[in-house]
Amino acid sequence: MRNRLAVYFVPEDDSPLGIFGGRLLGRLPRAGTPVERASFPGPRGRGFERSAEKAGRYGFHATLVAPFVPRVSEKTVANALKEFSKTRETIRMPGLAPKIMPGRFAALVPGDAVPESLGKLEKALVETMDEFRDKSVPPKDRGPLTERQKILMKKWGYPRVLGEFRFHLTLAGDVDENFFRLVGELMTPAVLEPFAIDSLSLSREDPDGIFRLVGSFRLGLPETGESG
């Protein structure tokens, strides 16, 4: 079976957002180079560190197309994503806000309405990448789902797509609000500032279970100035 692939938004390693994610998860978002992981005091802090370490196997990212088993070569998928990226415009995103998501995982989410172009980008990506998905591979169990999510799961192999899609950058799982109190020192105001989605990244799950970047492809059209 081929290694799973996913399409992510991955911030630049030297951006405030990328530096924050690297310190928290222990490796640079794009290069994958190990960096000193942030440590937190007390038993609860050590528990949060372990949760962040688990999230680190995916790298610091926002999912646009969830991991899937391709029916074609990695090169074919990469080339398709590269060509797709040339036809899409940079998206200006609002600032970010910390949030505990359903399922008790910590994430950074848009603090204001997102541009309509983000939903259009995600929809087009899901439809494009689905052409390369091996549909003979049963989807991963995602726990309790709504009826709508079950329909999406059956059609696209993942339940949180299209109307169920919510942009977020995952930080750690199985945490509570105390997590953000502990990481507050890392989360400078610059981390939460508005940013741009100006590239799409293809990541591959290697045999060790860690997702590593295959390549990042710059979006080819200029910014529209759309801000939501």
Image (cartoon, rainbow, N blue to C red):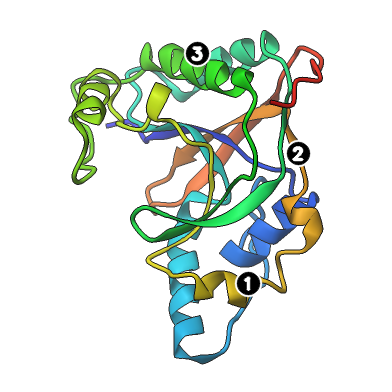
Q: CA distance from mark 2 to mark 1?
A: 20 Å
- What kind of residue is marked 1? Val
Between circles 3 and 2, the one closer to the viewer is 2
Q: Quadrant of residue 87?
A: top right
Does 220 sit above or below residue 112? above
Relative to residue 156, is residue 12 drawn left or right?
right
Horizontal and vertical percent for residue 193?
Answer: 77, 48
Query: Under tag 3, what secondary structure?
Result: helix
Looking at the figure, which quarter contains the C terminus? top right
Residue 45 location (% of width, % of height) = 51, 82
Would you place residue 170 above or below residue 205 in this image? below
- Pointer 3 or 1: first along the chain: 3
Q: Is residue 23 above or below residue 30?
A: below
- Mark found first going from the N terminus, 3 or 2: 3
Calculate the distance from the C-alpha at mark 3 to the C-alpha at mark 2. Answer: 21 Å
Please give the residue where the numbered disc 2 appears in the rendered image: 195
Q: Amino acid at mark 2?
A: Phe
Q: Is residue 158 left or right of residue 84?
A: left
Report the residue at 44% width, 73% height from top: 50
In the image, taking residue 95 as reference, residue 222 lies left or right, namely: right
Write down the residue under mark 1. 183
- On the image, the x and y values in percent for residue 88 come to 67, 13
Tag 3 residue: 124
In the structure shown, which secondary structural element does the residue marked by tag 2 occupy? strand
How many C-alpha atoms fall within 10 Å of the one at disc 3: few (<14), some, or many (≥20)?
some
